[in-house]
Every structure is written in C-alpha cells, then in structure tokens.
Amino acid sequence: MEELEDLKQIWKNHGQGYAPKKESEIALMLQGKSNSIISKLKRNVWVELIFTIACSIALGVYTFTLEAGAIMWTIISLLVLFAAYLFYYVKKLMLLGRFDASDGNMKSSLENLYKKLSVYISFYRKSYAVLYPVYFFLGIFFGALDTGFEGFLTRMKDPKTVVLLVAVTGSFFVFTFIATNFYLKKLYGNHLAKLRELLDELQG
Amino acid sequence: MTQEQEKSFVTLINENQGLIHKVCILYETDKELRNDLFQEIVLQLWKSFPTFRGEAKITTWMYRIALNTAISGLRKLGRKIKTEELEEFHFNISDHSEDHFEEDFKKLQWAIRQLSEIERAMIMMALDEVPYDEIAENIGITQNNVRVRMNRIREKIRHLIR
C-alpha cells in the first residue's frame, strides 16, 4: 500500500464515496451567499453603511427644525463624523472588493491574499488611530459647549487641569491602541499567521 | 451571465463534482463544514467561470479554484481540530466489518489528513493522475521541487499507515 501506484489504485477503487449532488442542487448553490469571511465582512460593512446614511438623513432633516444653539452644533458635528464614516466604509468595501477568487497558482494566490489582507488590517488600524482621537476631541468639545466656553477656557489656564487632560489623553490613546490591536489580532491574526505559514512552507 | 451559461456551468460541475467532493473530504472532516466548503467552491468557480477560456484543462482550472478556496483559510476556523481528533479516534477503533477497499481508503484518507494543507493538495493531484508539470504549475513551484516533495510525502504516508 506504500507505493504511489498502489495508493492511486485505492483512491480510484473507492469510486463515489460521497453523495452526488443533483443539477438542481448545484443550480440552487449559485443563488446562495458566499460563506467566506470576506463576503460576511462585506455584508456587515454594507449594513453599517446603509445605517449611517439613514441616520445622517434623519439627523439632517431634524437639524432644519432646530434653532441655532448647542444641540444644533452637536448634531452638525455628528453629521461631519458620519461623513467621515462614509469614506471609511467605502474605502473598506473597496479593499474587500479586491479579495476576489483567484484562478492563479496557489503560491501567487496566497501571496496576493496575504498582501491584501495585510493592507486591509493596516487600514483598519490606521483609521481607528484617527477616529478615536476624533471621538476624544468631540467629547471635550461637547463638554466645553455644555459648561460654556469661557468657563472651559478658565479651567484650561490651571496647569493641574492641563496635566490631567494630557494624562487622560495619553492613557486613552494607549488603551485604544492596545484594544484595537488585540481586536484585530483576534479577528484576523489567525488567518494572517496561517497564510504566512503556508507561504513559508511553499518557499521552504 | 446568461441562462445558457448557467446551464453549461451546472452541467460542467455535475460532470466533475467528484473533484470538488474529494477536496472537501480532505480539507473538512465535519459534514456541515464540508457542505459549506462545497458550496463555497462552486460559488468561486461560478465567479471565475467568465474568465475561463478553455486554454487550460477544465480539471486544472477546477483544481486551482477548489484548492485555493480550501487552503486560503478565509473560511470558518476553530471547530476543525476537535472534529479531526474525533475522526482519528473513530478511525483507530474502526469497525472490522468494512470491506478491504473501504478500510484501505479510510487509512489513506486519514494519512492524507495528517499532512500539511499543501502536501494534501499535491498528493491529491498525484493520486488523480495529474502530471508533475501540471502539479508544479498549479502550486507555483518547480517540477524538481514537486518531485522532491512527493518523495517526502510518500515517505510520510508510508510511515503513517505502516
């Protein structure tokens, strides 16, 4: 049973060791959804994109009913943030769109996949590195609006407040950086490591 | 794509579905995951169908897509190891009523599953009489490399099913 010819014989003799699919079943599969993680990610991003657009429209319409004031500016800030999110989602979809089935050889497909997944993860990390500071800035901005700019400026003259703010900002950034990296590693780390392993084996 | 294209694609898959089943059997041990992989391979083949111009053999094209889909790892991970362990356990205590061929096939299947994913792809093509130059082309390595690796794979299998 050791030699290749013997193994081929065993392989062939087994014949149809599976339940064959009917043509109608195969045709039905073409209407199905892809189970790949990329397809799921695409669907999730689309849902988030549609939700963001719907919220933007609703908030935009609501803004017209408001008089100029803190609430109106808060909503406008949110709309600006949502606009940034639209670009973010579109860019994400564009990156995910590049993960198409490859009919190239295994090595080049794995290399492409590894490169594209790395780019996607890097974009994910960078975008969060930008979005979290925006959230932080908005938090301070709304706080200032709530207490009045004059009171806020007076408090900022106190060195203790400035030191505290810098410390909180630093801790916030370090925490979000670690959390984002942990989340990304949990989501995609295994896939990247697996792809790297396969490539190393092919190159070895 | 037109209905005619869809029909010819379905016929093509139907005629060559054995190849997809074999890939699924070697890369997924869980029945449900195997069905998922089958559907995923069919979908990827369907996506790639318009670019298939018949320059390569149909089986070469199918092998490429099927193996790329199975190996790329962008499917569900996690449950695999547990099922594989169970399968191995089941194999070790396999019922003796199985006929000779079935037993040999199960042994071979088990041994192939112990190999790395790339080695599995190579031995599978070799067992299906795919010539070494085509295996080299599909994997993206040289023919010499295929020969060396195939010798190693044979050694491993010999050791596993001894």
Image (cartoon, helix red, strand yellow):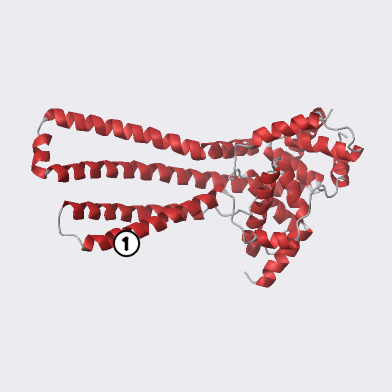
Identify which residue is drawn at 81% across, 48% down.
B128
Task: State which quarter of the image contains the N terminus of chain A.
Answer: top right
Compared with residue A161, is residue B55 higher up or lower down, i.e. above or below? below
> Dividing the picture into quarters, in which one does residue A34 lie?
bottom right
Counting the numbered discs, the total is 1
Q: Position of residue A189 (x, y in %)?
A: 51, 37
Amino acid type for the residue under numbered disc 1: Ile
Q: Which of B28 and B65 is in front in this view?
A: B28
Q: Where is residue A22 in the image (x, y as percent from the top left)?
A: 76, 59
Compared with residue A24, is residue B22 higher up or lower down, i.e. above or below? above
Q: Where is residue A75 in the image (x, y as percent from the top left)?
A: 24, 54
Compared with residue B106, is residue B32 higher up or lower down, i.e. above or below? below
Kindly state the secondary structure of the residue where label 1 is placed. helix
> Would you say residue B155 is visible in this rendering?
no
> Dividing the picture into quarters, in which one does residue B44 lie?
bottom right
Identify which residue is drawn at 22% across, 32% down.
A166
Task: State which quarter of the image contains the C terminus of chain A.
Answer: top right
Q: What residue is disc 1 on?
A: A57
Identify which residue is drawn at 78% across, 60% down.
B15
Q: Which of B145 and A70 is in front in this view?
A: A70
> Dividing the picture into quarters, in which one does residue A193 lie?
top right
Position of B11 compared to A184: left or right?
right
> Would you say residue B30 is visible in this rendering?
yes
Q: Which of B119 and A186 is in front in this view?
A: A186
